[in-house]
Image: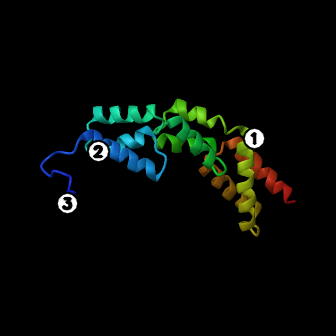
Amino acid sequence: MPPGPDENPDREADPREVARSIALRQLTMAPRTRAQLAEKMADRDVPDDVAVEVLDRFEEVGLVDDQAFAEGWVRSRSTGRGRRALAQELRRKGVDDETAAQALEAVDHDTQIDAARDLVRRKLRSTAGLDRAVRERRLFGMLARRGFPTDVVLRVVREELDGLG
């Protein structure tokens, strides 16, 4: 892109301004973790010390908050995912294990059972004509892939299939 009227093409861009611009642009699109923003800055060759400085400042003013990000992520995704899957997603987003564990406290055993039960009930309609063993395998697999613990998977699938008669 050609330089704007106020830009000097011979002058290097200030790395702090580049870092701030990257962070603000990313945060405008969606909430981001500190690690995600640092990765974007590294992609644009922002020096590590500058990235740390800018990210520290963004944390000070509340624009970057991994705890709030993790809590929001868990709240918005817990209806279709188990704790294990949510923990993996947070880890991929760069949330540390301690922060993730605090956010995941909101997903208790009963919450997981309710979420798994809702998913199974929806899936039961599409497996109506199948043999019970096939239905069990499909339901077990669906819940396992979504990160539900084994005890929840077994309990919910069996209860729901038994409830059908």
Where residue 87 appears, as percent x and y from the top left, is: 56, 40
Q: Which residue is mark 2?
A: 18
Quarter residue 55 falls in: top left
Residue at point 25%, 40% (across, down): 15
Kind of residue sitting beneath label 3: Pro
Dot 1: within a 10 Å radius of its alpha carbon, few (fewer than 14), some, or many (20 or more) residues?
few
Quadrant position of the C terminus in the picture:
bottom right
The residue carrying pointer 2 sits among few (fewer than 14), some (14 to 19) or many (20 or more) residues within 10 Å by Cα, namely some
Is tag 2's residue or tag 1's residue first in the polypeptide sequence? 2
Nearer to the camera, 114 or 4: 4
Q: Where's residue 35, x and y in %?
A: 41, 39
Identify which residue, 79 or 163, lies in the foreground: 79
Element class at badge 3: loop
Q: Relative to 119, is 106 above or below?
A: above
As drawn, the residue found furthest toward the right would be 165
Q: Quadrant of residue 75?
A: top right
**Image location of residue 120, percent across then percent down:** 73, 56
Residue 42 seen in this snapshot: no
- The crowd level at tag 3 (other Cα within 10 Å; few <14, some 14-19, many 20+) is few
The answer to the question of whether label 2 and label 1 lie on touching residues, with beta carbons closer than 8 A, is no
User: Is 116 placed left or right of 60 in the picture?
Assistant: right
Q: Amino acid at mark 1?
A: Asp
The amino acid at mark 2 is Val
Q: Earlier in the sequence, mark 1 or mark 3?
A: 3
Q: Which mark is residue 2?
A: 3
Mark number, residue 110: 1
